[in-house]
Image (tube, rainbow, N blue to C red):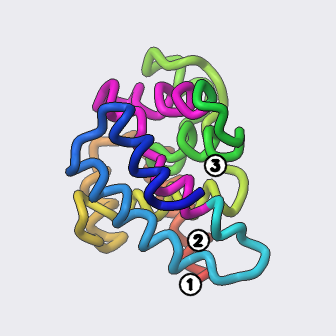
Amino acid sequence: MREQDCIALLRHAGCSEGVIAHCRAVRDLALTYASDPIVDRDLVATGALLHDIGRGVTHDLHHAEAGGAICRSLGLDDAVAVIVERHIGAGLTAEECSVLNLTPRDCTPRTLEEKIVAHADNLVKGTRIITLEERLARAIALPRRQRERIYRLALEVELLR
């Protein structure tokens, strides 16, 4: 999907210019991990640009779930909707979703494209790229399992760069 089409969808969904700038920064970083021919670069670019489309509805954790629903309602490829749903941190298990009052389903990234977008989002604060160390420091209040998942995801995705 072309960048201008993704930006139009973000605006239509009610996303601010700050969210749009963040999504562009995540896309730019994500593409640095997508040079291997086994990675679908177009899917990474589209998923990264639309990963926060749910922020037009809410800025809490529900934005991922809302974003997936928006993508499906727009008739977008389900692979894009799944990237949007699974981009939070390093993903959430069904149990963690249930505890957070989200639909209890496994939202951990599985495909390379899902993992790349989740990792890139972890390393972009606003439009600024941060280090893994800074990301982990920001995640200190999260349960240990979630912090470990963020770290393991980083180790896996950094191998693609």
Q: Residues within 10 Å of mark 2 (few under 14, many from 20)?
A: many
* Left or right of 79 in this view: 34: left
- The quarter of the picture where the N terminus appears is bottom right
Q: Which residue is mark 1?
A: 161
| Three-letter code for the amino acid on which mark 3 is drawn | Pro
Q: Position of residue 161 (x, y in %)?
A: 56, 84
Q: Main secondary structure of the magenta part?
A: helix
Q: Mark 1 and 3 residues: CB-CB less than 8 Å, in contact?
A: no
Q: Residues within 10 Å of mark 3 (few under 14, many from 20)?
A: many
Q: Label 1, label 3: how many angstroms apart (C-alpha)?
A: 18 Å
Q: Which residue is mark 3?
A: 109
Q: Is 70 inside the magenta-drawn segment?
A: yes
Q: Mark 2 and 1 residues: CB-CB less than 8 Å, in contact?
A: yes
Seen in the picture, residue 87 relative to 93 is either above or below; the reply is: below
Residue numbers of the magenta segment = 44-71
| Three-letter code for the amino acid on which mark 2 is drawn | Val
Q: Secondary structure at mark 2?
A: helix
Front residue of this view, candidates 137 and 32 = 32
Residue at 55% from the left image edge and 63% from the top image edge = 45
Residue at 60% from the left image edge and 58% from the top image edge = 115
Q: Which residue is mark 2?
A: 157
| Three-letter code for the amino acid on which mark 1 is drawn | Arg
Seen in the picture, residue 142 relative to 24 is either above or below; the reply is: above
